[in-house]
Amino acid sequence: MRRQSPLQRIQHLLHSHPALSPLAVLVISFIIFTIINPSLATPTPLSFIFQQVAVIAALAIGQTLIILTAGVDLSVGAIAIVSMLVMASLSAQQKLPGILALIIGVIVGTLCGLLNGLLVTRLRLPPFIVTLGTLSIFTAIALLYSGGKSIGRQQMDPLLSWTRTPIPIGTFTLTMGVIIVIIMALIMSFVLSQTAWGRHVYAVGDDIEAARLAGIRVNRVLLSVYTVAGLIYGITGWVAIGRAGGASANAITNGNLESITAVVIGGTSLFGGRGGIVGTMLGALIVYTFNQGLSLAHVDAQWRVLAVGLLIIVAVSLDQWIRRVKA
Amino acid sequence: MTTASSDFTPHALSEEEQTTVGLGAPPVLAEPSKTVLSGRGLIKTFGKVVGLDGVDIDLFPGEVLAVIGDNGAGKSTLIKALTGALIPDSGQVFLDGQEVHFRGPQDARQAGIETVYQTLAVAPALDIAANMFLGRERRRSGPLGSILRMLDKGGMKEAAGKSMANLGIATVQNMGQAVETLSGGQRQAVAVARAATFATKFVVLDEPTAALGVKETGQVLNLIRQIKEKGLPVILISHNMPNVFEVSDRIHIARLGGCAGVITPKSHTPTEAVAIMTGATTLQKG
């Protein structure tokens, strides 16, 4: 082995373990905020962070998949809203059984993802443009479909707001929605790291030509990624009904950008091929720890926005530096 | 290899031909049943541009066949037509004497033909073992593999290590190392090792030394010899005359969409090869 400078060693470490840097940021920021206001490290604010982060974290799982393929999805929040409104109104207005309304809502989300995937693979349009277009389309559909009205959870089948059911774990209180998101994260993390499909997702994002030459059916992988992401957004719509206490076309409008923020801060490269779900979950937690920590420190909410902006720049610069790793 | 040289008989130049260096007779075409790969009358046009003008080519068991030619001479088009990356307008391709119709590179791969592309078809962020098995991952045995579809990561790492060792690649030890942390020569070694591991018929190397330094070029040439030793024929596309003359048994000279002749490093000198390649000399038609 050649001698490496300490900096090179750090670079190599971060290169092989991309989730380390967001983990460090999370731990350090948590410690700092706890020093400023020790009440952060108590069950109530911590439980609150988890409940708050659930919807964005769920969207960010799907977003991670797409960013790993060197794409980006601007329509995440819009798809979740469409699913949410479909399931809510099928139950509240069409009086469909809760389970049927839920399944149809999730299927609609999946089809929205499939449409994105078809546009990306068949028309060969850049994902940014495709999802910028479908963002408007899905948002308009949601508004037209709901007539701009929101549907309270009392009007729907209890199954649709089941995701708000509190789950006490020791002194913490999570919700069913949080548990669903954690399960989704675990499943996707497993699939990405342990299956051939997961490996192909990375390969396609890493070097699409190399993946094609290695015999990977690149378009099929991309199509499946967008479809699975749609499925995840559909389920997120269900989680969001529980979180918001109802369905509304204005529910998760911050989801598009915040999910990308979580993915990028979580160490997944916007250029594709590296990163993962664990980092994304840490990234989402970082954003909401800042949120909670700064509010407990009685700092103006705008500072959070500024801090998150800085974190994005730092995270992307770090990614660029790690990419330059040498043998 | 003795077996290989006897198979060359239809192509080897006779004593008297060898005395007329530079004016050897064009080879008598072999029976496709005696070759690993034969192309007959391959034609491919791109609009008005003629890519292949009725080319014949033979690859014999155990040999290294170099394909040389100027830019635009039809080297790449020829190789693509043989490996399914392009479908020729007309002509036949025989693999082990059987006519084949590849509709894509995947068909050729399935038939046991592996190609190492000039653009190094490796995914930089994936590790060596992952690259080696990219597109043909192994799953674990039992329900972990069949139901959970888990990859046999350990097994693939071990197998990757073995094939690298078989080819005498000792500079890379850790199969879990990302390919982007390797040098250019080591990356090329991974790509070549992958081809050699999965090929059952022959290996095509497209300009494998183009981007490499002297030492690394030497290592890749060694790899080519190792593959030959394993009994796998190799088609080597190259611009580099010293490399070609160092490792190849026969040299197919592509020129203007056709074939200007097939020579051997013994029958001709690199200078003559270049002269034939550029059209300064022609091989006399027998």
Image (spheres, coloured by chain):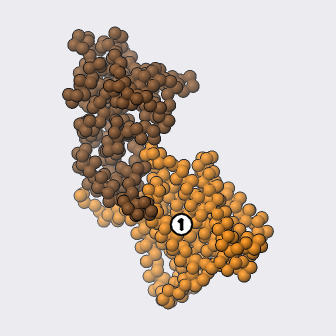
Chain colours: A orange, B brown
Toward the front, the furthest residue is B142
The residue to which callout 1 is attached is A61
Residue A144 coordinates in the image, percent (x, y):
77, 64
Residue A309 seen in the figure = no
- Above or below, comparing residue B6 to residue B172 in the picture: above
Quadrant (top left/top right/bottom left/bottom right) for the N terminus of chain A:
bottom left
Residue at coordinates 54% horizontally, 57% vertically from top-left?
Answer: A225
Residue at coordinates 32% horizontally, 63% vertically from top-left?
Answer: A9
Residue B277 coordinates in the image, percent (x, y):
37, 21
- Above or below, comparing residue B179 to residue A19 in the picture: above
Residue at coordinates 41% horizontally, 44% vertically from top-left?
Answer: B121
Quadrant (top left/top right/bottom left/bottom right) for the C terminus of chain A:
bottom left
- Above or below, comparing residue B82 to residue B29 in the picture: below
Residue B273 coordinates in the image, percent (x, y):
31, 21
Q: Nearest the camera: B117 or A179?
A: A179
Q: Nearest the camera: A126 or A58?
A: A58
Residue at coordinates 24% horizontally, 14% vertically from top-left?
Answer: B14
Residue A130 coordinates in the image, percent (x, y):
64, 53
Chain for mark 1?
A
Please tell me whether mark 1 sits on a helix, a strand or a loop: helix
Is residue A239 toward the left or the right of residue B237 in the image? right
Task: Examine the image and state in which quarter residue B117 appears.
Answer: top left
Toward the right, the furthest residue is A147
Q: Nearest the camera: B38 or A8?
A: B38
Residue B213 seen in the figure = yes
Amino acid type, callout 1: Ile
Question: Callout 1 environment at 10 Å: few (<14), some (14 to 19), or many (20+)?
Answer: many
Is residue B129 toward the left or the right of residue A153 in the image? left
Number of labels in the image equals 1
